Image (cartoon, rainbow, N blue to C red):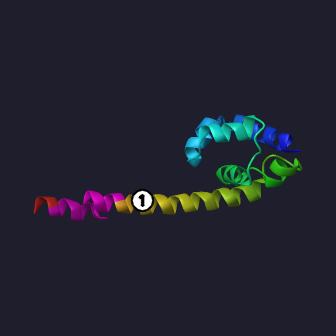
Amino acid sequence: MESEVKERVRMILRENKTNPTKLSKLFGLNQKTLNNQINADTQLSVSIILLILEHFPSISAEWLLRGKGEMYLQSGDAKTEDLQFLREKIIRLEAENKVLREVAGLHSGNDEVTNEKTA
């Protein structure tokens, strides 16, 4: 059963043109540990499965864990999850942008920055 889940994880990686090394960097995990969990006899941890499902929101958990149904969620479900993921990412990026602008001494309005520099 677990070998089937690992094979489905490898399918996800192939479909998304990625590998355990890239995922380990993305997830902040030890590359050897992740590679062993996916490709060797080491048991696949629940935390790795959850990270994979979080990173690939269009993948069906039912398919990954049980092999039931389709690899990808129905388009409506996937679109809803993808939109939520993108909204959260936009919020994080806007917050990061605001911090970087503050660190750089920039203000939100371009006119204010120009006026301060010329004054």
> Does residue 27 belong to the magenta stretch?
no
Local crowd at mark 1 within 10 Å, few (<14), some, or many (≥20)? few
- The residue at 81%/46% (across/down) is 71
> Does residue 111 belong to the magenta stretch?
yes
In the image, is 1 to the left or to the right of 119?
A: right
In the image, is 100 to the left or to the right of 35?
A: left
User: What's under tag 1, amino acid-wise?
Assistant: Glu
Q: Position of residue 24 (x, y in %)?
A: 60, 42
Secondary structure, mark 1, is helix
User: What is the count of numbered marks?
Assistant: 1
Q: Which residues are magenta?
A: 100-116
Query: Most extreme residue toward the left, as rendered?
Result: 119
Q: Which residue is mark 1?
A: 96
119 or 106, nearer to the observer: 106
In the image, is 30 to the left or to the right of 59?
A: left
The part of the image, by quadrant, that contains residue 34 is top right
- The residue at 75%/58% (across/down) is 76
19 or 70, nearer to the observer: 19
Q: Position of residue 49 (x, y in %)?
A: 73, 51
Quadrant in which the C terminus appears: bottom left
Query: Does residue 118 appear in this view?
Result: yes
Query: Does residue 57 appear in this view?
Result: no
In the image, is 84 to the left or to the right of 92?
A: right
Q: Position of residue 1 (x, y in %)?
A: 89, 44
Q: Is residue 88 above or below residue 52?
A: below
